[in-house]
Amino acid sequence: MSALAAALAYRRLVQESASLRLLRSDLLAVTAAVLSTHLSAPGARMPAAEAHELIDADLDELRDHFDLGAKSAKAYCDDWRAAGILVRRPSADARGETYELSPEAIEAIRVLDQLDRPRSTVTESRLVGLMTAVHRLAVDTDSDVGRRLGALQAERDRIDSEMDRLRCGDVDVLDDRRALERVTEVLLQAQDLPGDFARVRARFETLNQELRASILDAQGAQGAVLDDVFAGVDVIESSDEGATFTAFSALIRDPERSAAFDADVADILDRDFARGLSADSRRALRTLVRELKNGSRQVHGVLTEFARGLRRYVYSQEFARDRALRTALQDALAGAVPASRQRRPYAELGAELELPALRSRSVGELSPYDPSDFDTGVALLDDTPGTVDLAVLAALARETEIDYPELVRNVNEVLTGAPSATVGQVLAAHPASQGVASVVGLLSLATRHGRVSDEESERLDWCGADGIDRWARVDVHVFTEPVDA
């Protein structure tokens, strides 16, 4: 590429990239600090009204140190949304809208974080990972059967030699320095997860708009149109973001691999070298699987909503109405061109049109009256009252609510013979009769009436309603005194 071609490409990038737009902003420090404080967590999404309130409080404090003028949080959020830094979506859980960071904003904040806390660019674990990946690629792309068999044989000989050394008691444990180095590499890769998931969500939304537009151009039967639409979903799998999401999703959907990954993380945190990690690093490592699941769940939610919306758009014949409207608009525009040669658009027609009090900027803002929207269906009939069974009501209440009186009795009974007790000790003496609900209830009581130690963890076991034994590793919750009923 010549210098001119590269300069033109970079100029286009500078003009179009929201990441660079944020990085060259005059208020970069304030914008990055405010947004990272409230929306930097993976998958973070906040109601617009709550975000305005919190950011207004931040601005009041920041005005003592920065020239921010009198703009409100809502005005700043509108500017950030127009610049592609914030994404505003309708809330799925309640009325209103939510804010979240765009993929470009996440990337820009990552750049600032790396500049503020530079990390070593060359480490042993990174070089080993690079060499391993290159070797794996060379083997997997080799069509020579002999060379591939030789590589597999060499790998098996190495494994056999390692097993022989272990049988003889020769255990070579990784030293603390290299272990911490590898953990740091894992955490650095984990920091890319929010941006990866955000880019996948954005790619799905772009594909949604493209396929809806293609429906209006498609010809043929309704089934053929639908097949053409969903064939386009495969486009996402060929992108880098789609490949990343597919790998993450495969891990999360496989219960065995997910449980093994979670167990490996717990084992690492129990090692002696893990005490050298900061509290933030330990927390990030402990919640790594949960963040993977949350990110995968959000992307699956977007994909599900995308697929349902397209199916509804086709089967409800909305696309046919939009196609007819587009055809009518195109016919009107085509007729307006020759008519403009005979009569100017601003010439008086001799007719009066009474405009509504509410101004509309787009035809899409108008909602035609549909009588079916007010159809309440078949009238409800009075039902014959029956006899209430107290035992059934009690069982129903126990299925829907946590039995706190029972948990209080269990805690106080354990504390009669000991000065303190953890949630795990209470469960050992009194198994969870309501499954995970009892575990959640005990953790809630310990949070209010005891203390929580995030430096230690313990394993909690219970049996679910389906009869399957389950367990979880949580921070140690300790009851230090009897709980009031």
Image (cartoon, rainbow, N blue to C red):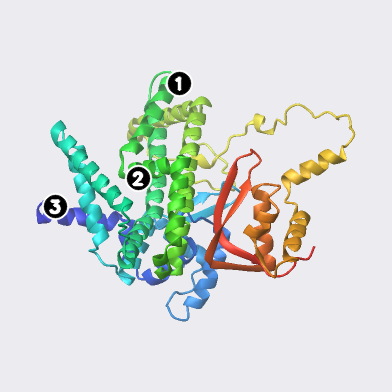
> Which residue is identified by label 2?
244
89 or 113: which is nearer to us? 113
Residue depth check, mark 3 versus mark 2: number of the one nearer the observer: 2
Q: Secondary structure at mark 2?
A: helix
Task: Please say whether residue 289 is visible from this viewpoint.
Answer: yes
> Which residue is identified by label 1?
222
Q: Secondary structure at mark 3?
A: helix
Q: Is residue 420 left or right of residue 291?
A: right
What is the residue that sits farthest to the left in this orientation?
2
Q: Position of residue 193 (x, y in %)?
A: 39, 53
435 or 345: which is nearer to us? 435
Numbered badge on residue 5: 3
What is the residue that sits farthest to the top in this orientation?
221
Circles 1 and 3 in contact, beta carbons < 8 Å: no
Which quadrant is home to the C terminus?
Answer: bottom right
Q: Position of residue 477 (x, y in %)?
A: 61, 64
Residue depth check, mark 2 versus mark 1: number of the one nearer the observer: 2
